[in-house]
Amino acid sequence: MILRSGAAAVAGGVGAAALAACGEAEVVEKTVTVTVTEVKEVVKEVPVETVVTKEVVKEVPVETVVTKEVIKEVPVVEVKEVEVEKVVTQEKVVQVEVEKVVEREKVVEVMVENPKADSLVIATPQTQKVDDLDGSQVYEFQTKIAAFCCSESLLLYDYQTQTLKPRLAESWEVASDATSVTFTLREGATWHNGDPFTAEDVAFNFNRIFRDDDPYHAEGTFYYNGFAQPFYGDTEVLDERTVRVNLTQPDALAAEKFGALDSSYMAHPPSVMEHGNREYSTDPDKYVGTGPYIPVEVRPAELVRMVRNENWWGPKPDFKELIFRIFPRGAAGSDARVNALLAGEIDVALYTPATRRNDLFRTPGIGAKWFPNFVLGYFYINHTFPLFQDNRVRQAVARSFDRVAYHEATSGPTVVPWGRFWFPGSPYLNDAAELDYDPAQVESLMQDAGFSKGGDGVWANGDMRAEFKIQYRGDPGSPPDQETFWMQGLNDQGFQVELEAWDPAIGADFDNGPYAQQNLHVGGWGVGVFLGDPAFAYQRWTAGDLFARSYMDNAEMNQLYQDILVEADATNRTQKVHRMQEIAADQVAWIPNTVRTLGAAWREEKVTNVTSGATQYSYPWLYKVAPV
Amino acid sequence: MSRYIARRLLSIIPLLIAVSLVVFAMSKALPGDPVEIFLQQADIANPELVNAMKDKYGLNDPLPVQYWTWLSLMFQGDMGESIRRGEAVSDLLFRGMRNTFSVATASVLLVIVVGWTMGVLSAVVHNRSWPQVITRFLAQVPVLMLSIPGFAVAVFMVLIFGISLGWLPTSGVSNPRAGADDLIDLGKHLILPTIGLALASVGGNWRLARNTMIEVLREDYIRMAHAKGLPLWRVYFLHGLRTTLVPLLTSAGLLFGSLLTGSFILEYIFAWPGIGLLLVESTVNRDVPVVMGATIMIASMYIFLNLAVDILYAIVDPRVRYA
Amino acid sequence: MHSALSLDHPAGQRVRRTATFLREHPVLSASLVPIILTIIIALIAPLLPVTDPNRANLSVRYLPPLSEAYILGKDRLGNDVVHPESNPEFFPSSVVERYEPPIRKHYVLGADSLGRDIVSRLIWGSRVSLMIGIFANVAVVLISVFFGLLAGYLGGRVDGVIMRLVDIGLAFPGLLLALLILTVLGPSVINMAVAVILSSVPLNIRFFRGQVLTVRNAKYVEAARLLGYNNLRIMFREVLPNVMPLIITVTALNATSFFIFTAGFSLIGMGLQPPDPDWGTIMSDGLRALYEQPAVILGPTILISVLAICFNVLGDEVQKILSPRESQL
């Protein structure tokens, strides 16, 4: 990582246009840049479509094929020379520029065919605070879809490549002792009102977000600042374009925490000072951001309308107008979203329900896009319950129900069924530390723990019978199908299980409250946002939640956690995280239940290919890419 | 007459107080602590924070003080802030009410236009001794309307008119590409929810109008009018209809009141951001300020509507005033 | 048995009279058939040869109506193991006792989101639904008639107290009141019945009181009063029979709305708790699955509609019989 940021620092002088959409772009050789600018001029001059651009497209890939071989030849581990790194990045820049050329051409095409494509209507579920425009104050991930189109953070964590990418900051460097992180800001980035984006703005925002005693912290709803707050010391302005965040305790992932976390989105200091956090975040007239789109109208519970920011630092945003149409949350809105998509009222529907998959796939003109969006469900076990004090019993429970089969049967091609904490392809993924469905294993684990099956087929060990309850969260319109299926799986494996509705009225005290009697709890639905951060996982495993609380007081685990905070080397960190996972799996801190969702479905006749960045797991703006 | 109205207006004051007490008691009877619920969902379990938040919402005061604060603030138009959404309750309610109001009004209009007209027509048909097939049919259609759940009809209408034919919008209150106050657009969005919501009431009013009108047409003064040789339309629509309207007006008034609660199921199907969805959502999440605000608002509107109906009744039928 | 029904025996006479009555009123008899049939099915549900209504089987998820699957055998818990194809390898580990050859199973109304047989869910669900639709209904009518009689006939202070309470109840539209009651009490069948009863009683009391008021000053009531009969006797012997036709009509109307009520509350997760079925739950399941498998919602909708029509027709017929003037309608 340090290597890469060093390389990025060299790239400081390269123009913003060349850096374009892809954060990987770091070093550009002059000859290549020249070719690219020529192509661009051609696009601008020719009104509709040109054969010329297409020819250029064909020419460029020849170069890329050559450089691709270079990538394969250079073993990743041995990359130590900056020059080799340069070769790799050159190739990437060329590729990106080619894509952009085709993209512009495509925009012209679409505009000619369908004037509606000038504006894009995206359906989103309503959230608790749906009208928040300030990225650092949004609560739920659905809200971010709109907020992240108008506000930006310093960096971006791209879950597809699992790397950090530059955004408002062009480069970053974590100190070798992991006690500070330095960001170099993008040159030419401006606020919507024309003010330049400066280092002072960053300092103002970090104090506003992470300091409870800051005068501009008041009224702000910074739901996710808790993950970085304990690490935050202060922000030093080194010069107009450089800031350094000093940490109170070392953290090797400080760049992610302060650059790319949900809480670290930038707000316009004069506007916040004048209007206060709430009004700034909810009133489009008072909101000033830096993002590719500028909010112009908010009709609560109805829509958020944004227009193109012509002065954005990145490539010209594709849509003149972006409309987020807000549907009710939960099951109430999801069917309506699909109906509206089928009827052609909207262009993109996010979070389409699995039950409508056939409708969507059958209808011509509608395509679906994989969203790198991970929905993580936890299944908590109450460790204080006598039955669960033996970790073999907990493991047996975890292996008793087939969560992957459930997702596969019910959601089929709209999700990637997954029963693990880290998503497919993640370096942290550890097969050895997973508790997959395995009836044979259940039998032997229970027998090891001294249980035998009684006449009614239920495990018993003396007076202790394998009986417990599963709690489910009853949301309007969503019956606990999944929990019902799991209950049956557990029953089949010899556990006597009942379902019980979770009453949100009864507080969170699982040690003493009425729920201390309840033994499994389905809850804590999270998203992939934190999955890249082992420290977050550690919080989940240990102190983070409910039932896991008191039972993960494990010296080795705590030591490993301290180690990963300062461990800058990715390989070493991964090894340590794997060990932590194994401890967590042995103790059964949670049973993960993960799906990767098919996030967007859109009408093909209107837009060819929309990637919604919507959530920060991929790109924070909507753009079109070349048809494959 | 004015004395009657004054008396009735005075009589609702104790009723309003009683209702506010019931709402307040109900909000206290809701199990659990709203602040803790909210904090727990935000993954925070910090007693200091809980206490600070309770102070902020005045939940640490003694009950009578809480009641009085709530009541006096409400008279100043301040219903507090939604715990979950952080928005003023009055804004939330106004928005929900506006959407529910439009569909409720459209439903009552549909009931009047279709239910009453068909009811009166089928009574006339019955009175003129048309063929049994027709009279029977006109008598049984409203029974069918009353019996089939409206939301089931609604979803099939979405499939047919919304998705397959594309004639009408499938959900929501507006087309995002249309302007903010585009009435034609709103009208289009209203059609399907209105039919779904009003189906049973159309049936009920059809039947009521038919039965009442048949009764009325048997009265002596109608026979008298016939005997006088008045034209048929005058007999039916001037003499007959006038008397028939009295119970119908009452029924429409009450219907409007109950429609203002919003129908959760219809709003669910049409993604209609009305008061029903808001009420259910905040009840499930124990967003007590919103539940209290919505309940007291709906209850007061209901009381005033009932009052209006009573007064209207008294105007039409003077005997009521002395009862 | 046969001798008990002989013509001169009082019970026999009653049966004969009933039979004659039913023959004379074919519409009424026809409307009674589905109601009685449903009640019988609900009562004997445990004896009927249907599969476990809660047994999920994802391999037959959203099976369309009139399709068939195969029961491969019985698992350890005695439940049928079903598969749409007769592939005995499908559930190798969980099947203990295997049928050879597998039994064909017909899914007359298909299967729901978890592959549960809708017919067996409807049959078992009728028990809860009828409890709400009929027994809660009867409770509503009994309570409201009693208080309506008291308020309407006795008048004065009794009337004042009852009607003030009713006014408070009436200030809340029924749905809102039921929602609040259910939230306070927590979700369960009994609580749903309580909520339905409490929320519909005020309107019914006011309605019956109004009817009693019209009868109260009738000549025959005054005559009874002059004869020196006590209030109770007059209320129940003279007044009550005269509001009877309305009671039956109101009961019929209530039944319809109660079914739909329960469906609504199941939809928001405040009705019967899963996995146990009632028609409302099946309906709300069907509502979610509507676009994937519209057949799921058809069963409960048709059942509720048919029963509602029967109740309505029954109400009309009884009214015609009891008040001849109306019968000309």
Image: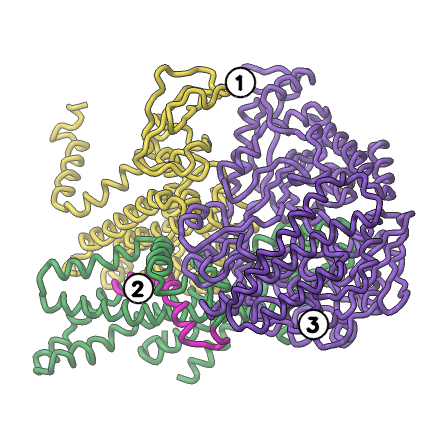
Chain colours: A purple, B green, C yellow
Please, what is the three-letter code of the amino acid marked with disc 1? Asp
Per the rendering, the mark at residue B202 is 2
| Measured Cα–Cα span from mark 2 to mark 1 | 55 Å
Q: Chain of mark 3?
A: A
Q: Position of residue C171 (x, y in %)?
A: 48, 65
- Seen in the picture, residue A525 relative to A298 is either above or below; the reply is above
Seen from the viewer's position, the closer of residues C200 and A432 is: A432
Specify few, some or many for label 2: CA neighbours under 10 Å numbering under 14, 14-19, or 20 or more.
many
Q: Position of residue A139 (x, y in %)?
A: 67, 57
Would you name the residue on which mark 3 appears? A279
Residue at horizontal 52 percent and vertical 67 percent from the top = A50
Disc with the residue nearer the chain's start (3 vs 1): 3
Q: Is residue B26 visible?
A: no
Q: Is disc 2 in the same subunit as disc 1?
A: no
Would you name the residue on which mark 1 appears? A456
Judged by its main secondary structure, the magenta piece is: helix
- Seen in the picture, residue C48 relative to A207 is either above or below; the reply is above
Bounds of the magenta segment: B178-207
In the image, is C239 to the left or to the right of C285? left
Please, what is the three-letter code of the amino acid marked with disc 3? Glu
Q: Residue furthest bottom?
A: B2
